[in-house]
Image (spheres, helix red, strand yellow):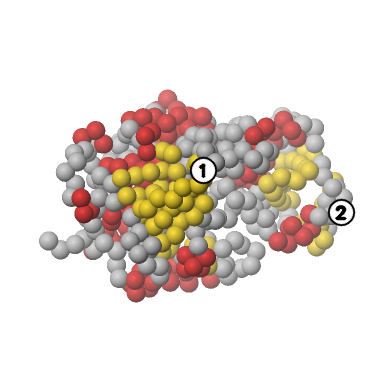
Amino acid sequence: MVCGTYYFIPLPSPSTSILPHKMTLTEQTLDKQDGKKKRVAVIGGGVSGIVTTKWLVQEGHQVKTFEQSSAVGGNWRYIGPESSTDNTNADSEHSSCYKNLKSITSTSYMSFEGHRMPKNYGKYPHHTKIFKYLSDYCNINGLWNYFILNTKVTAVRQTEGGYNVTYITGGIEQTESFDAVAICNGHNSQPYWPKELMAGLEHYTGNVIHSRAYRDPEQFQGQNVLILGGGISGRQISYDVSSKASYVALSSRRNVRGSEIYRGKPGWHALAKFTRSEVEVLPALGIAPFSEKTVRFANGYERDFDAIIVCTGYKNSFPFLDQDTINSIVRLPPRTENPAYLYLFKHTFPVFSSACPTMAFIGMMDVADSSMFYVADVQAKWFAELLSEKTTLPAPCKMQVETDKWKNMIEINYHPMVINSPTLFYEDVQRVTDQNKPKI
């Protein structure tokens, strides 16, 4: 099964352990062979960083997890509207969580192995409950001592024996050596602004924000608001802001039906009728679409808007990596309006870099049913066991062949970072692991 060519298959029941059972951290002993114990730097303390830390510690590796904000939790940590506009606040740079955000994924599929979300969280929990779940997971697994908070990684440079990681903490720059690096800094923090949109917005005089800066609907009280982008965030925010705005419209290049507008619970199948306003679905923007507060659409329709919320997604950003490393993994998209994508074996390991398998990218893809917890869990365990030499990766030429099959599919349908079936992703990784176990 080639990575990326999946069809959806439901995940196993929450009562079923998907991954093989491992001893808890409290059951671990220190009888790991010293030669297989690695010093590992984890960059980022969100969902991916937390679960990666857990698996690395469980495998007996020496771990430091660097988080630039004042707490772990990543995109599930809510930062209020005051902080979100403060560019000097490291917390505001990291989270895109807004006040009324709820999960669109069932709790059945948002859990790590061995620690299911409580049933009383409901099927689609509020972000506060997900943040609590992550905190409880850290407590249960004794992870807090591995997190280095308020610390920004500025450089990761490969050396002959590993990596030099440079970071700033307390205003002091320091450099440490590590055997391996897990990059878990997320892909929902750097806003993506399409060039053609930016060129037109210079003529617009209303308020413009990216969805990353959206925190609550109160600031749009009584306004006419346009949402640009018909993805998940565009649909969710269109519903949320409609509770305060006088009029809300959603414009998308792809076909979005009015029945697909998010209504406060997952699913796109209820009519978009609201108490104070109704979300109207409009076509894509027209040529020269902006003039002061007037917006023109492809069908010739025009309307004035007080504010625009741009929901065009995010782009990957690795400011701490050197240009050679970035060039080896970042690929330009076949369609210029899309952001660059990552050329990685199974969305995890660089194919051409000598860093493979001591550098891993965890959680850097979109998952079709948003089961990122599950996929990151699989990736993190795979990386930890590779470092423990319980398995190996295929030869670079074989990894290139598989990754090129996925890459060629992008030329037909641009969805390079999407995993359509977490279950099949796990099975694919398990196949690679079983085929490459060292011979005894």
In this rendering, the answer to whether 50 lies above or below 336 is above
Residue at image position (58%, 40%) is 90
Give the mark nearest the N terminus, 2 or 1.
Answer: 1
Structural distance between the alpha carbons of marks 2 and 1: 48 Å
Is label 2 in contact with label 1 (beta carbons under 8 Å)?
no
Q: Residue at x 25, y 50 (%)?
A: 37
Disc sitting over residue 291 in the figure: 2
Q: Which residue is mark 1?
A: 172
Q: Nearer the viewer, residue 99 or 422?
A: 99
Report the front residue among 75 and 420. 75
Secondary element under disc 1, as helix, strand or loop, is strand
Image x and y of residue 318, in percent: 52, 56
- Which quarter of the figure is the C terminus placed in? bottom left
The answer to whether one can see residue 287 in this image is: yes
The x and y percentages for residue 181 are 39, 54
Question: Can you tell which of label 2 and label 1 is closer to the viewer?
Answer: 1
Write down the quadrant of residue 319 in the picture.
bottom right
Q: Is residue 280 visible?
A: no
Q: Kindly identify the residue that appears in the image at 63 percent across and 54 percent down.
A: 192
**426 horizontally vs 255: left or right:** left
Q: Is the residue 407 above or below the residue 28 in the image? A: below
Q: Amino acid at mark 1?
A: Ile
Residue 320 location in percent, x, y? 51, 55
Q: Amino acid at mark 2?
A: Ser
